[in-house]
Amino acid sequence: MFGITVRETQLLSGVAVAAATAAATTLYWMSKKRPSPDELERDRRDALVQKGRIIDATVLDINELSPEESDRPLGMQLILYQYDVAGVTYECSQDVTLLQHVVDIHKIRLSFPASVRYDPHNPGNSLIVAESWSGLRDTANSIPLHPLRRARQAVV
């Protein structure tokens, strides 16, 4: 009369398995290592280098903040640049503190043309330099002059 039926046993088993699965999933997500902000930024740069469109830009300024000003142990180095997409002007800055092995901000020429990679779905998401790509130029010409033409111009 007070016995548990087969159906009730199956129901209790199902509830126990569901509870165990939920507990295991919760434990997994809580213990999973989340990417650091630097890792997320590197992933963003990699994605823009792979799929971003390239457009002309102008380097506006550089800014170097001390560790006290930026609340970061290494301080902060910024490149400020401007570009136009579909009639909209974007003024952006990129933190290049972790890219010092790629770019020296003190050698960047201000007001020089450059190239920017941007996300066509979000044009404000852009970069001017990454580990494997740089839109910074050494000359104002986007196409280097042929060596003979350079020699002729030096003579004249």
Image (spheres, grey):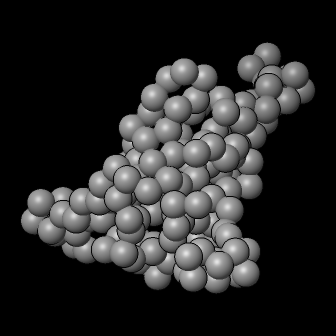
Give the quarter of the figure containing the N terminus: top right
Q: Which residue occupies the foreground of this view, 35 or 48?
A: 48
Please state if 65 lies on the left or on the right of 15 as rendered.
Answer: left
Give the x, y percent position of residue 114. Answer: 53, 55
Numbered marks: total: 0
Q: Which residue occupies the foreground of this view, 152 or 113?
A: 152
Measured along the vertical axis of the image, is residue 80 above or below residue 142? above
Give the x, y percent position of residue 127. Answer: 52, 52
- Please identify the quarter of the rendering in which residue 112 is found: bottom left
Instruction: Let me know if residue 39 appears in the view.
Output: no
Looking at the image, the residue that sits furthest to the left is 68
Instruction: Let me know if residue 11 appears in the view.
Output: yes
- Please identify the quarter of the rendering in which residue 142 is found: bottom right
Please state if 107 lies on the left or on the right of 8 as rendered.
Answer: left
Query: Residue shown at 65%/29% (left/top)?
Result: 121
Please state if 113 lies on the left or on the right of 61 as rendered.
Answer: right
- Please identify the quarter of the rendering in which residue 103 is found: bottom left
Q: Which residue occupies the foreground of this view, 19 or 91?
A: 91
Measured along the vertical axis of the image, is residue 124 above or below residue 100? above
Give the quarter of the figure containing the C terminus: bottom right
Looking at the image, the residue that sits furthest to the front is 156
Please state if 67 lies on the left or on the right of 83 as rendered.
Answer: left
Query: Residue shown at 50%/77% (left/top)?
Result: 102
Query: Residue shown at 79%/32% (left/top)?
Result: 14
Looking at the image, the residue that sits furthest to the right is 6
Give the x, y percent position of residue 83. Answer: 49, 38
